[in-house]
Image: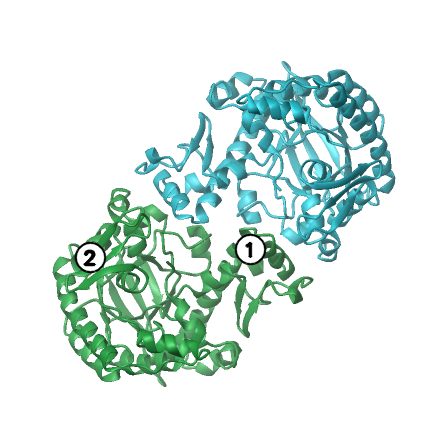
Chain colours: A green, B cyan
Amino acid sequence: MAIDFTITHRCRETGARTGRVRTPHGDFETPAFMPVGTRGSIKGLTPGQVAATGSEIVLNNAYHLMLRPGDDLVARQGGVHAFMGWDGPILTDSGGYQAFSMADINQVDDEGVTFKSIIDGAPVHLGPERAIEVQNNLGADIIMAFDDCPPAVDPDLAEAARRRRGREGGPGETASHAARLRAAHERTVRWLDRCIAAHRAPDRQALFGIVQGGPDLELRRRSVDEICARELPGYAIGGVAVGEGPETIRHVVEFTAPLLPETRPRYLMGVGYERDIVAAVRAGVDMFDCVLPTRNGRNATIFTRTGRLRLRNARFAEDDGVIEPGCDCEACAGGFARAYLRHLFLAGEMLGPILASIHNIRHFQRLLLDIRRAIREDAWSFVTRAWPVLSADDGGPVAADAESTHPEA
Amino acid sequence: MAIDFTITHRCRETGARTGRVRTPHGDFETPAFMPVGTRGSIKGLTPGQVAATGSEIVLNNAYHLMLRPGDDLVARQGGVHAFMGWDGPILTDSGGYQAFSMADINQVDDEGVTFKSIIDGAPVHLGPERAIEVQNNLGADIIMAFDDCPPAVDPDLAEAARRRRGREGGPGETASHAARLRAAHERTVRWLDRCIAAHRAPDRQALFGIVQGGPDLELRRRSVDEICARELPGYAIGGVAVGEGPETIRHVVEFTAPLLPETRPRYLMGVGYERDIVAAVRAGVDMFDCVLPTRNGRNATIFTRTGRLRLRNARFAEDDGVIEPGCDCEACAGGFARAYLRHLFLAGEMLGPILASIHNIRHFQRLLLDIRRAIREDAWSFVTRAWPVLSADDGGPVAADAESTHPEA
């Protein structure tokens, strides 16, 4: 098997556990947070700067790299590790989520998705065999099954809810959407078998299955039963943070995570804010990825232990304090003042997004460090005390933001 | 005196010398190349990355920092060193060049320039007293006199020459432009006395005078006589690379540099390509600044010892070699392939400009390292052999590019 997962400690109070995943490119500690390098680069950061944030594993998007520069080109360059200069563990997603949610789709059927390339408009086909071939070419240590990933909420209802000024559309409110979710679950299972059969390098790349089922807990249970009937090195919870609200995300994760095999790493895809992560860890999740630290960083939004700050705000114009006192990231330890960061953003200087992204990724890595310590010491109150944002009204996830946590187009 | 200049070796064959400038923020070796951080940031690079290129002193533009975030704000933040997180020597230009060449000017007279702010259109006045006040507020180790900096070539003739497909307009071809150059010289001398009188911190900030005179060598001699009659810690050659061609630049520099006081650092402003720098060093110049490495880097143009490369070119699509074999910059030593750099630029990823800028700045620092060694060892042929670009037809300066070496708007 390509990876080896060792659980090093189990929380006495919750389902949380610490562990270590051994991969062909080194180990990473779990629970782990993976920054997102959509196109083979964590935006604005050198691999050395990414490593300095404490990140041990990064995520790349097979969908984007397939379209440009092409997975075959990356393979000829020695694979995605050599290509992007990251010697540590890498996970690639399969492109399923992007193909279903971002692409200009021409056709969806049991063979997969045909859509227009965002590069040149040419028709592109992505199905289970091709998604695995792409990921074999990229050569990441962990690769993902190709899944059918519908929106959690009926798109028409969600649109109507948005028109009613942000009221969340209820899950599965129409018979047709419920049928769509069931069909997606069944198709995801059929595609998983085809992914397993197509996988050329199971000794070097660990293929994770993805549980679907939307917000329907009974459908989630059936998906777990069937996906986990296939013996795989890890399992993911997919189809969350795709339009539903934070409470729904939490219910689905708390229900689904404990059903997954105890001895395999559990990966919650595309989530999320600090409270989402803590809740998921307590439910037994081991791996996370999210674009929030980098995307928000580029927009001058800073994560701190007490909540988010918008650095363009005029109140920071003369603020000579660092982004977050006590933080050990390259930006805070380097002594850059909030006033300087604000200036960089107002002047359109690249260094603003760079320093903000470094701080934000380190923010999530420090949260995961504290979470791992809390698990080892059976002391969750330590995390709550150190991270007021977890209990703040304004620092947690909000429905309008929940949609935007997925990898960028 | 704020700085101390020690000449450590004089070339036996040429006017070149090596030296060391001691400043309140540390030393730098000469001949020195200063990367340009227009708005208080070398674009896309952390101060640590800038230092890793071997840069010992950086340049900031008083004009830009005065307009945003404001020199008073920078002063309240502890000065430009603290503001940008660069503990080493810093030089600020006075804003004269920018005010005359970039701004939307309302009025020019003996009091200075009144122009519209590029930030909000408000009227801004810059004259000798205000230019020194701005630089006192910023607090750089070396500050520049406020000079009247007209284009080297009559603007109407230059425009006509451009229409004739790149033929260079001759210098001083009209009586009115010759009069403009004489008036600029005389005004620059008058303004220098007002700068000296206005300077509040001569013990902490070294004020350099600027020689003008355009392409007229006799006017250059008169300017040297009058500017250098004022006892100052250093002198600069201004008014070059402002529209004239490389041969004119060279003649002016080779004529003017040896006239400047032997015991003071000589700074050639805004120049230039590798051949320009080598020629100027041989004429006795000690300091250089130029936006070429960063601006070209952002546009995917790479400097190498054998000439420039455009990394967007399709011929690099599958090139698994580093940017320049043998280079020790962070990008080349990190093993990033040309194919990866090309991908980053095509995908619009920030890391492309960042790695290219790092390589390009290091390229100029390695040239200066070799130049200093050649001077110490009286072995110029070593530089010529190691840098084929110095004798290549296509790697040197071209008239159309010469205009674009000055600090960015």
Q: Amino acid at mark 1?
A: Gly
Say yes or no: labels 2 and 1 on the same chain: yes
Vertical placement of A100 versus A351: above or below?
Answer: below
Q: Which one is earlier in the sequence, the residue at label 2 or at label 1? A: 2
Q: Is residue A370 left or right of residue B229?
A: left
Q: Is residue B131 visible?
A: yes
Tell me the quarter of the picture where residue B125 sits: top right
Q: Dot 2, crowdedness within 10 Å: few (<14), some or many (≥20)?
A: many
Give the numbered dot on residue A271: none
Q: Residue at image x 31%, y 65%?
A: A101
Residue A70: image x %, image y %?
Answer: 28, 47
Q: Nearer the viewer, residue A142 or B25?
A: A142
Residue B65: image x %, image y %?
Answer: 68, 48
Q: Is residue B17 visible?
A: no
Task: Kindly check if marks 2 and 1 are in contact, taking CB atoms under 8 A apart as contact.
Answer: no
Q: Which residue is mark 1?
A: A352
Q: Which residue is mark 2?
A: A132
Q: Amino acid at mark 2?
A: Ile
Secondary element at tag 1: helix
Vertical placement of A373 versus B18: above or below?
Answer: below
Q: Is residue B263 left or right of residue A312?
A: right
Residue B389: image x %, image y %?
Answer: 48, 23
Tell me the quarter of the picture where residue B19 sits: top right
Q: What's the CA distance linking mark 2 and mark 1?
A: 37 Å
Q: Dot 1, crowdedness within 10 Å: few (<14), some or many (≥20)?
A: many
Q: Chain of mark 2?
A: A
Q: Chain of mark 1?
A: A
Report the quarter where the C terminus of chain A lies: bottom left
Secondary element at tag 2: helix
Residue A149: image x %, image y %?
Answer: 26, 69
